[in-house]
Image (spheres, rainbow, N blue to C red):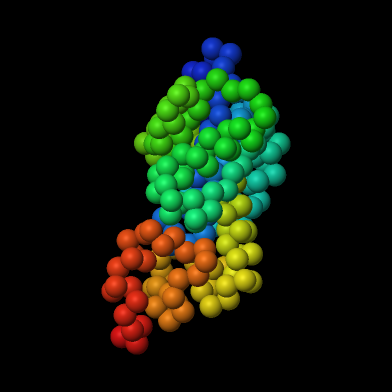
Amino acid sequence: MTEHEERFWKEGLLVAGVDEAGRGPLAGPVVACAVILRPFTKPFLDRDSKKLTPKQREDLVDLIKQNSLAIGTAVVDSALIDRVNILQATKIAMRRALEDLKHPFDVVITDYVKLEGINCLPLVKGDERSLSCACASIIAKVLRDKIMEHFDKFFPGYEFSKHKGYPTRKHRVAIAKNGPSEIHRKSFSLLREQSLFRTHQR
């Protein structure tokens, strides 16, 4: 998982892996993370980061920190997502995460998101092919899950702690029953369509 990093490390360049969590949900923020691993770090993941359990992801956070020179995070809320669209909000979150590193870097590897004006390598399935990107993905997911668990206390009718805002059947039923909350993404087509608000007693 470090094939792409190693060709930059051999040139004396520092690599920042960047990824996000939360592009697909109907509610909550998109969260981005940037990770600069120590050059020539050996792979310590043996599977796709998306296939890890929540407990496995949380357990890996300390190991990622131990192997990193810097970690940056950023959160973009649903209001900004509605204003600029989810792709642009994702790019904003990623750029803010890179700024939050407060550490120089030379190259950015992303999970197929092109960041203009930056020396960026957007890899297809980057979180499976780049250790830096996978580490960023894990931290972003852990942070976003905690945010949604926190929101569950303020919006108890939606069970955010269980589905984390993704469009599960139970979540869509809750929206049909309660209407969208303050943190729902009103611009998303599933929330705009009348069919979403039909009776849930089918």
Name the residue: 59% across, 23% down.
Answer: 105
Q: Position of residue 173 (x, y in %)?
A: 40, 78
Can see residue 47? no
Can see residue 63? yes
Say left or right for 133 vs 67: left
Residue 185, by quadrant, is bottom left
Residue 65, by quadrant, is top right
Q: Position of residue 27 (x, y in %)?
A: 48, 62
Quarter in which the C terminus is drawn:
bottom left
Q: Position of residue 101 (x, y in %)?
A: 64, 33
Q: Position of residue 106 (x, y in %)?
A: 55, 20
- Nearest the viewer among 142 and 73 is 73
Q: State the count of labels.
A: 0
Name the residue: 66% across, 51% down.
Answer: 59
Instruction: State the residue lying farthest toward the front.
Output: 83
Relative vertical location of residue 5 with respect to residue 55 in this rendering, above or below: above
Instruction: State the residue lying farthest toward the bottom.
Output: 201
- Nearest the viewer among 82 and 111 is 82
Say left or right for 53 vs 23: right
Name the residue: 49% across, 51% down.
Answer: 80
